[in-house]
Amino acid sequence: MKMQASLLHEPGRPLEVADLDLEGPKEDEVMVRMIATGVCHSCLHVVDGSWTGFPMPMVLGDEGAGIVEEIGPGVRHVKPGDHVILSWAPACGRCHYCVTGLSHLCERQMPGKGVLMDGTSRMKIKGQTVYHYGPACSYASYSVMPASCAIPIRNDMPLEVAALIGCSVMTGVGSVINTAAVTPGASMAVFGTGGIGLNVIQGGTLVQAHPIIAVDINPAKLEYAKSFGATHTIDARKENPVEAIKDLTGRGADYSFVAVGNAQVINQAWDCLASRGQCLLIGLPPTGSTVTFDTGNLQSNERILRGCKYGSARTWDDFPRMVELYLAGKLKIDELVTRRFDLEGANEAFDALSAGEVARGLIVF
Ligand SMILES: [Zn+2]
Ligand SMILES: [Zn+2]
């Protein structure tokens, strides 16, 4: 079938809306009609070339929601018409990590960049292969993905809102409630208050962390962070965030979260910790980045440096849980969407994101 997608031909070049041929779902795959997709920083890293090694041309997008259009052989958990949130972490359901509640670390990984589980793509333009950014690329009116990437949710949840649960909400809130398992009254410092950082902050609000200190270099974003529950804000261009966090907490932060892809910020997030404090890396700096730090603090203060992938999402349980929290008024998602675009507006959406103008841009189909 024909569908429309926003195509990246090479990094640094504007995306282009094109008509693509889409093959139907094969075994254990589903086709989803996209309703909305968020504009995520990870895709911006591919567009601006700071993350490398992706086959082109490619359809980007890793945060979407839609309606199941067609299912391939062997798919039983959804049927056409079901509402789903897309996950970018396929899970086999049987490996060591899947069966121990860590399906985001599933051992059955994609066979290569840009393809589905069988090593091929479902998309073509004029006979030439078009690659999938992730297993569930979402800048397309229709997308075929592994069945485990289509997570069913209740159909009274607005799908435009649900789209954001697929990456930024899950990653940010999950980093607090799943990965770090922050307890009430623990102090948190959040570096970077974009789409992910705001969700780290609201994760802290959910578990009643205190204080929740937001650090950024954009005063407008810091103001926004307060509405998501930040109790204190630090403009890192005006004051030293490490000293300011130590002043506010007395002994340093119990948890620091790096929600920005900048290696220098990792050092600040490490230096602001209390003894036994934990620094979680969510944002990924450019490909090949390294950081150095004083090992003395690691050993004598028992600090922990920890990676955080996808908020340690158990997507099948966590997505519906996020939906329930939203519908109960305990999770802000509408407020994350600062601008809406159509598929033609993808370039504008990336410009707005890199200029720090938006918490989250949303492409609506
Ligand atoms: Zn993302
Ligand atoms: Zn697995």
Image: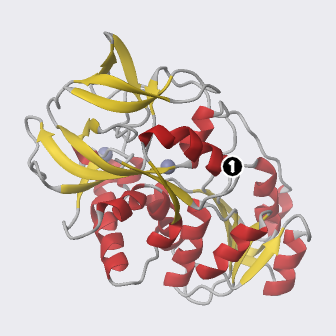
Residue 144 to residue 206: above or below: above
Coordinates of residue 297 in the picture (x, y in percent) = 82, 64
Q: Quadrant of residue 316?
A: bottom left
Q: Is residue 314 visible?
A: no
Amino acid type at image mark 1: Gly
Coordinates of residue 174 in the picture (x, y in percent) = 47, 66
| Residue that mark 1 sits on | 261
Quadrant of the frame with the N terminus: top left
Name the side, left or right, on which 254 lies relative to 9.
right
Residue 88 to residue 232: above or below: above
Label 1, residues with CA under 10 Å away: few <14, some 14-19, many ≥20: many
Residue 164 to residue 34: above or below: below
Q: Quadrant of residue 224?
A: bottom right
Which residue lies most toward the top here? 127
Coordinates of residue 12 in the picture (x, y in percent) = 65, 27
Q: Is residue 134 visible?
A: yes
